[in-house]
Image (cartoon, rainbow, N blue to C red):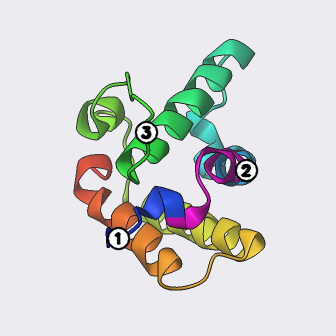
Amino acid sequence: MTEKTLYQRLGGYDVIVVAVDDLLPRLMADDTLGRFWKNRSKDGIARERQLLIDYLANASGGSMYYTGRAMKLSHDGMGIDQNDWTRFTGHVAASLDHLGVKDPERADVVGFIESLKAEIVD
């Protein structure tokens, strides 16, 4: 018997889209984190949204192909600090709550997000 991927356990592509569509507006509306989207065009934000969907789908075991840059390169020079990271993870938790994601999937998502910290925080 093959264990299901996190992608499958979360519910696949459609659930990842719903999660990104819940999380991204939270981040953009945040008093501190909103600065990262302040001067982005509507098309630029749409592209970032799709890249995030593709990245999360791929990283969680789905068949989506991620064409964006590596996390380190994407976030290099942005000045993301520990306060930003704490605010970001708070929004991730709020989105997981809103979507009703329970353990063990919640722990797996949080663990994955935390594994990216060194590549994102300056």
Dot placed on the residue nearer the N-terminal end, 3 or 1: 1
Q: Which residue is drawn at 37% across and 24% down?
A: 68
What segment is highlighted magenta in the picture? 9-18
Look at the numbered discs 3 and 1 and tell me whether their residues touch, using CB distance below 8 Å.
no
Q: Distance between the residues labelled 2 and 1?
A: 24 Å
Tell me the residue that label 3 is attached to: 55
- Considering every residue shown, the one lying at the far front of the view is 1
Look at label 1 and name its amino acid. Glu
Mark 3 nearby-residue class (10 Å; few <14, some 14–19, many ≥20): many
- State the image coordinates of residue 70 (x, y, percent, origin top left): 27, 33
At 49% from the left and 34% from the top, the residue drawn is 54
Residue 75 relative to residue 95: left or right: left
Does residue 64 belong to the magenta stretch?
no
Residue that mark 1 sits on? 3
Q: Which amino acid does label 3 sit on?
A: Tyr
Q: How many marks?
A: 3
At 40% from the left edge and 42% from the top edge, which residue is drawn?
Answer: 58
Looking at the picture, tell me which residue is in the foreground, 13 or 76.
Answer: 13
Q: Secondary structure of the magenta portion, mostly?
A: helix
Q: Is mark 1 on a helix, strand or loop?
A: loop
Residue 17 forms part of the magenta stretch:
yes
Q: Mark 2 sits on what residue? A: 18
Type of amino acid at the residue the image marks with label 2: Val
Between 22 and 120, the one nearer to me in the picture:
22
Q: What element carries label 2?
A: helix
Q: Are there few (<14), some (14-19), or many (20+) residues within 10 Å of tag 1?
A: few
